[in-house]
Amino acid sequence: MPVRLSISDLERETGISRDTLRIWERRYGFPEPLRNQRSERNYSVEQLERLRLIKQLLGSGMRPGKLARLDLQQLCQITQQQRETDTVPRDVEELLQILVTGPRYGLLARLEALLQQQGLRDFLIGVLAPMTHAVGEAWFAGRIGVLDEHHYTEQVRMVLLAALRSLPQTPGNSRALLTTLPGEQHGLGLLMATCMLALEGVEILLLGVQTPLEEIVRGAIEGECRIVGISCSEYINRRTVAAQLVRLRSMLPNTVSLWAGGRGTNSLPKMPVGIKLFRHLGEIPEAVQQK
């Protein structure tokens, strides 16, 4: 009997919200669910694979209406063509190869060696930022599994936490609170931004992931922070991100700057004055100097 997936399964496995999936179903006729005895939507594994590829291709600027009309083979061909034209740094190719084929315990050693060779700033911008994107694409394409993605995340976390501990522990000229919005479970970008800010002498109050908006405001006020930094991955709904950022801005004192970065901010609509969006880590040093 073929495996059938619920709409919750699709949302979890692809990062595409169920609201978006329903809109695509009405507008483009895909995904096309079957119905079980309780009239609940059921989907095939092939539809899951198509949606994974569609999500990956959306990041390159393609439109969902065009992609929804393509079958699995056509989507695979387009994805392969993009991989062939993309330039991937040699270090990223090597790390991805270790992650995919092993040895399993070689990843940490190679990450530590690259950090030692390049220094923290160049390691963050030139290695970790493109590598983290490559890992996400590999997961969407089914080249790696959850185990591999989690393994990568934890090895990077160990490396960055050790690097943070080695930085001079002198009080900074300014303080920043860093966290993610409610519903955002991915914290690797948060840790990368923490390292970049720490290199600029900013004192960090790191709260981890999924902090309620009211608690973000309380932490910023009590911690006397001049900056609130929000990390947004591409796995959370863009409208949700935009609405929460606008609400958070209205709750924060005018003396506190609200910064947001990560791939989840790439397709956000224009934000109100007082919300600064970052497209990549390299923009952080200049922003700190201007603060």
Image: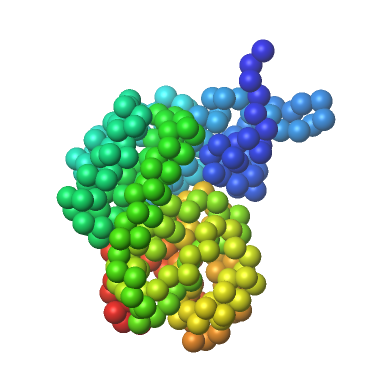
Look at the picture and state if 68 lies above or below 19: above
Residue sitting farthest toward the right: 38
Q: Residue at x 82, y 30 (%)?
A: 38
Instruction: Tell me residue 122's x, y (percent).
Output: 22, 57
Image quadrant containing the N terminus: top right
Foreground residue among 28 and 198? 198
Foreground residue among 287 and 238? 287
Q: Residue at x 63, y 65 (%)?
A: 212
Instruction: Tell me residue 174's x, y (percent).
Output: 39, 80
Foreground residue among 79 and 260? 260
Picture mark count: 0
Instruction: Tell me residue 113's x, y (percent).
Output: 22, 44
Q: Residue at x 57, y 80 (%)?
A: 222
Q: Residue at x 54, y 57 (%)?
A: 209
Image quarter of residue 265: bottom left
Image quadrant containing the C terminus: bottom left
- In the image, taking residue 158 as reference, residue 11 lies left or right, namely right
| Residue 62 in view here | no
